[in-house]
Amino acid sequence: MIRLLLADDQALVRGAMAALLSLEPDLEVVAEVARGDEVVSAALVARPDVALVDVEMPGLDGIAATAVLREQLPSCRVLVVTTFGRPGYLRRAIEAGACGFVVKDSPAEQLADAIRRVHSGLRVVDPALAVESLAAGPSPLTPR
Amino acid sequence: YFGGWTAFRASVWMLGVVFELDRSRQVQADLAVAEERLRFARDLHDILGRNLSVIAVKSELAAALARRGRDESADEMMAVRDIAQESLREVRDVVRGYREVDLATELSGARSVLRSAGVATRVVGEVSPLPPDVQAVLGWVAREGTTNVLRHSSASTCVITVARDDGCVTLTMVNDGVRSASGESAGSGLSGLAERLGELGGSLTAERLDGDRFRLAARVPS
Amino acid sequence: YFGGWTAFRASVWMLGVVFELDRSRQVQADLAVAEERLRFARDLHDILGRNLSVIAVKSELAAALARRGRDESADEMMAVRDIAQESLREVRDVVRGYREVDLATELSGARSVLRSAGVATRVVGEVSPLPPDVQAVLGWVAREGTTNVLRHSSASTCVITVARDDGCVTLTMVNDGVRSASGESAGSGLSGLAERLGELGGSLTAERLDGDRFRLAARVPS
Ligand SMILES: Nc1ncnc2c1ncn2[C@@H]1O[C@H](COP(=O)(O)OP(=O)(O)OP(=O)(O)O)[C@@H](O)[C@H]1O
Ligand SMILES: Nc1ncnc2c1ncn2[C@@H]1O[C@H](COP(=O)(O)OP(=O)(O)OP(=O)(O)O)[C@@H](O)[C@H]1O
Ligand SMILES: [Mg+2]
Ligand SMILES: [Mg+2]
Ligand SMILES: [Mg+2]
């Protein structure tokens, strides 16, 4: 059994993802949080093997949360999930110690497969997302 | 140093330049508006992206539940339908917004253009929801007023006020730095505005105030 | 006629004007770009509007089928998922289109991503000014190449070279750490690049070298 933590502030996505992944025989969701600053404390209690972490979350962004999680619970591997890649995301995610970077809307099969690969120590990078996130520097559109 | 001929040529050339500068201010105003709309579009993409992610994940879940003969699948599908309809409404609102003049956008465009021309500009009052035709006409007032400030004054400050009182909305622009009457014949910008306002039962006043100031005020029932 | 001092002042003023004119051309160019993007955004909204309508109708149908215990409901929901994913892809493409590809920026992005993944990376050669379409296609090569290094190798070093010779620009990426053939079927990244390069009269080669190395080389006339 691969134990999963899901961190996403979009409750609808998180709930549906949890239900979908739980249908896989080898995956089990052991914790869910909606804020970046709750990732580490939840992980220290539930001891997941893999954390799926959304980038844009209140409290602390998912990439910053990944860095802390990797430090506090190194046995837990991190798969960063997002709707949009933005310039700099991929570099920051890798720097923070994430093993994977995929879009949220990946088909369930692919998502489950990405989780298994990350769990076995492989790196997973969604190519389309990488293309969006590779560029250095801020987005040319006015930042918030 | 310049001889007479050169000076003449130079001033003809300058006339052309001044003309181009005017156009360039208009372009600047258009750019500010376009950029504002793009910001809007980007925000819309963010919202839609999020909604589409929910739709993708939930519909996959619904299919998985249906395959297992589980009753919740119908509920999941109806939830997907609701999200799709909600998103559709948002797209429609925004697309409509492209075709209409949106007063808030025009005002923020005006402010940013004036500021970038070195005019300290404040927009006072709030634009409560107004009917589209009122927004459109006041949007035109803001544009023409802004162009006039740039063309006919060396303003260092400008205050734009939007206010509501007994059944009317007024938009007022006051700037300083009015140049002494140039004698050049006035154009048709303000009279065009007065006409548009008249069609909605409104009116326009434009007057020189003390202290080199100019006030443009549009009033329209709403 | 102009005296020396006046002429001097006039020419200083003209300098300012010429400077402003340059800026105004820039503003005009920016406006053209912004308007192009808005057109894009509008098209996107039309597509999204259509897709969202289909999603709304199909998910309602799926729910009705599920309530009647009919198996087709799962297929309908998978179709909804596919439409949602397709729509998201289009949103992403458009959002990406807002960003002009600048080769120097792409290369420094590639270097920093690879370095943060522990790959010692050097970028060699210089990017002299290149036409936008050449920069765009080489930017794509850099992105796809970098993604491939991350996905298909355990590289410890990577060298990216940009060079010009007789009317061509070449971009080469060499990495080590090639994994033994994984048996998984290859994707379409490189063939897509070859196609884009072909449109500009260029070409792509990708080959395994001695010592677990991989070389990707793009060549395009410029
Ligand atoms: N904000 C202002 N500051 C100082 N003077 C102004 C201002 N707005 C208008 N004026 C004066 O009022 C006149 C009439 O303005 P109006 O907009 O009708 O015409 P115009 O700007 O000269 O030409 P057009 O708008 O047709 O291009 C201007 O020529 C100018 O002398
Ligand atoms: N830098 C590299 N190091 C090692 N092998 C590589 C490298 N680049 C490409 N390859 C090999 O070439 C194959 C074809 O690459 P290509 O980019 O066309 O497809 P892909 O990356 O597998 O899928 P896609 O790009 O469509 O997501 C890869 O599957 C991989 O085996
Ligand atoms: Mg989020
Ligand atoms: Mg005028
Ligand atoms: Mg590839």
Image (cartoon, coloured by chain):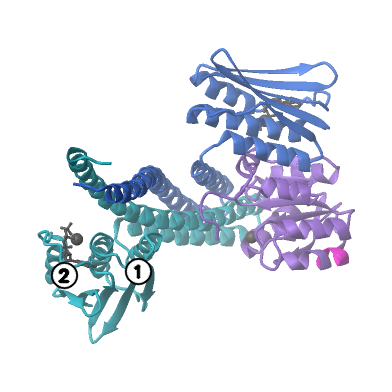
Chain colours: A purple, B cyan, C blue
Residues drawn in magenta: A42-46
Q: Is residue B24 above or below residue C188?
A: below
- Marked residue chain, label 1: B
Q: Magenta segment: does it hold B170?
A: no
Along the line of sight, which residue is nearer the eye, C158 or C128?
C128
Residue at the image point whose x is 30% and y is 80% from the top: B163
Give the residue pinned by disc 2. Answer: B197
Type of the residue with mark 1: Ser
Q: Quadrant of ligand 4?
A: bottom left
Residue C103, by quadrant, is top right
The picture places residue C105, in percent across and down from the top left corner, at 61, 39
B193 with respect to A121 (left or right): left
Disc 2 is placed on an element classified as: helix
Disc 1 is placed on an element classified as: loop
Residue at the image point whose x is 66% and y is 48% from the top: A88
Q: Nearer the viewer, mark 2 or mark 1?
A: 1
Give the residue pinned by disc 1. Answer: B156
Residue at the image point whose x is 75% and y is 64% from the top: A32
